């Protein structure tokens, strides 16, 4: 960080004025963590598609133009995550989100079959069952205000545990569930605090600080939760010995106990010596976090938008009536026919991308237009600003699902809520399946009404895009 390198082409790019030697370290120090998103959006508005923020000799190149996003995300070699992701190492270890190089390739290969169509088809029953529980719980509220994020994140956590992990979270684990969700929130806050306090970037200093000690305790809670999930599934596998199924047979008609989960693939890989228990724990932590928080946020912001747009709800309702009639069950083919709902979800993720920024540490020089971006530079891809570009999405602040119906995107990388290229989201088809099932069922059963029409929460970005204030809506049975 302290190494001087005065001849770097990216220094020609605009950005907040840099002081000699320290660059923008002083600004970084003064940034309140909960305002990071607002500040970065302001910088984009001021300095444009490409700007540089420099902390001592570390250059952070921020980009939000579609051609630049394409160059970075589609690069086959520059797949290493940037330094702030390392702050999550104690939690997610060498799991798929954080790892790089050969290790990442190997894991991605083991885990890709998890999202095979037959497996997703099998998950449909679980997702539907969980959605029906949610509908019942919301009916019992009798139209009272419901705080969305806690309600929906319970639902998505139960769903990922029962699908990917094959573990049912029953009532006696309720307090562990609450502790786990609080731990995740806490981890996000600590990570943000660390990003903006450069002296805490050093592991030794951080681990010995009061923040570091609190962080370690928080990690223990998250890890213990994941360990329980692994133990549960191991015990079930011993019980079911001899009844194992392969992905190819994992189609309809298989009971919950015999359903193949992602965790089974990992446990099978362990039996073949391809992964050890620490590796399994890292992947379970990665998938439980990525697999529930991201979808919970998308559904939360989505329900907030639907509550304000009765016309959109009605159109989803009509589409569901046409496709499903009175049927209680939703099949994969029904879901793929729901084109309007798909456009609605895309528009939700345009305005509120669950992952607002992606960071890469450049390991191989590459060209961005006529500028050479050197090895060692950090590149931050701003999905949030990319999705709100007026040249790509006219009236960008407006919620208009129709923009995703029939019209071609102006640039293939103008819209990347699941990232793109080699490190794209492995769970995107699962996420779409879960979101479509949930939103279609909720709209079929309820009229969603805002507590205060047009109210928007303040938002912030830690690992994901979060509402700072609670969002309330009413679910009025149809
Ligand atoms: C609305 C829902 C979701 C959104 C918007 C989303 C978005 C993303 C994005 C933008 C990335 C790239 C992150 C980066 O490069 O730093 C990513 C990666 C990833 N996502 Fe998702 N995700 C969602 C749901 C899920 C689900 C349901 C799962 C698991 C079941 C999942 C698992 C992962 C994993 C493991 C990675 C790392 C992949 C790799 O690097 O090979 N995500 N996701």
Image (cartoon, rainbow, N blue to C red):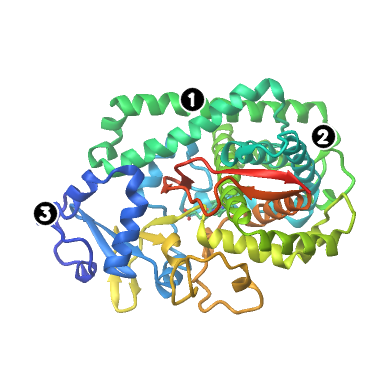
Q: Which residue is mark 2?
A: 257
Asked if residue 113 shows in the view, the reply is no
Q: Which residue is mark 3?
A: 21
For the residues marked 1 and 3, what is the alpha-carbon distance in whole angstroms? Answer: 39 Å
Residue 396 shown left or right of residue 121 in the figure:
left
For residue 14, the mark is none
Q: Residue furthest top?
A: 172
In percent of width and height, residue 144 lies at 66, 37
User: Nearest the camera: 439 or 227?
Assistant: 439
For the residues marked 1 and 2, what is the alpha-carbon distance in whole angstroms? Answer: 29 Å
Q: Earlier in the sequence, mark 1 or mark 3?
A: 3
Q: Which residue is mark 1?
A: 220
Q: Residue furthest left?
A: 20
Q: Residue furthest front?
A: 452
In percent of width and height, residue 9 lies at 22, 70
Q: Which structural element holds mark 1?
A: helix
Residue at disc 2, CB closer than 8 Å to ligand 1: no
Q: Earlier in the sequence, mark 2 or mark 3?
A: 3
Q: Relative to 252, say whether 87 is above or below.
A: above
In percent of width and height, residue 333 lies at 82, 61
């Amino acid at each position: 960080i302290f190494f001087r390198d005065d001849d770097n082409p990216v220094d020609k790019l605009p950005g907040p004025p840099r002081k000699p030697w320290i660059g923008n370290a002083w600004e970084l120090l003064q940034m309140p963590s909960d305002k990071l998103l607002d500040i970065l959006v302001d910088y984009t508005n001021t300095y444009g598609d490409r700007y540089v923020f420099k902390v001592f000799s570390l250059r952070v190149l921020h980009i939000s133009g579609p051609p630049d996003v394409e160059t970075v995300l589609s690069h086959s070699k520059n797949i290493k995550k940037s330094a702030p992701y390392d702050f999550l190492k104690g939690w997610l270890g060498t799991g798929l989100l954080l790892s790089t190089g050969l290790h990442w390739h190997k894991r991605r290969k083991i885990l890709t079959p998890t999202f095979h169509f037959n497996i997703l088809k099998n998950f449909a029953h679980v997702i539907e069952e969980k959605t029906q529980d949610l509908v019942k719980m919301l009916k019992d509220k009798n139209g009272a205000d419901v705080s969305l994020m806690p309600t929906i994140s319970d639902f998505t956590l139960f769903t990922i545990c029962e699908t990917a992990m094959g573990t049912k979270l029953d009532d006696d684990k309720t307090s562990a569930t609450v502790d786990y969700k609080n731990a995740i929130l806490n981890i996000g806050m600590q990570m943000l605090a660390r990003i903006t306090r450069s002296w805490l970037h050093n592991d030794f200093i951080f681990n010995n600080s009061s923040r570091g000690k609190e962080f370690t305790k928080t990690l223990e809670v998250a890890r213990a939760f994941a360990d329980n999930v692994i133990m549960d599934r191991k015990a079930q596998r011993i019980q079911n010995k001899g009844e194992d199924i392969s992905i190819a047979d994992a189609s309809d008609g298989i009971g919950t106990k015999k359903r193949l989960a992602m965790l089974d693939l990992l446990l099978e890989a362990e039996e073949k010596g391809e992964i050890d228990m620490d590796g399994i724990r890292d992947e379970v932590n990665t998938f439980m976090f990525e697999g529930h928080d991201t979808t919970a946020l998308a559904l939360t912001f989505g329900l907030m938008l639907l509550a304000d747009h009765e016309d959109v709800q009605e159109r989803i309702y009509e589409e569901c009536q046409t496709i499903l009639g009175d049927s209680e069950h939703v099949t994969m083919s029904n879901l793929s026919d729901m084109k309007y709902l798909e456009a609605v979800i895309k528009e939700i993720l345009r305005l509120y991308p669950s992952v607002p920024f992606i960071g890469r540490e450049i390991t191989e020089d590459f060209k961005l237009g006529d500028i050479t971006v050197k090895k060692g530079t950090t590149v931050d891809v701003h999905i949030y600003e990319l999705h709100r570009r007026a040249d790509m999405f006219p009236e960008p602040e407006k919620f208009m699902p129709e923009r995703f119906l029939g019209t071609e995107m102006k640039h293939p990388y103008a819209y990347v809520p699941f990232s793109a290229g080699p490190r794209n989201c492995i769970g995107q088809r699962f996420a779409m399946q879960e979101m479509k099932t949930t939103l279609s069922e909720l709209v079929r059963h309820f009229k969603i009404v805002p507590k205060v029409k047009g109210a928007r929460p303040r938002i912030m970005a830690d690992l994901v895009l979060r509402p700072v204030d609670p969002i309330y809506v009413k679910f009025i049975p149809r």
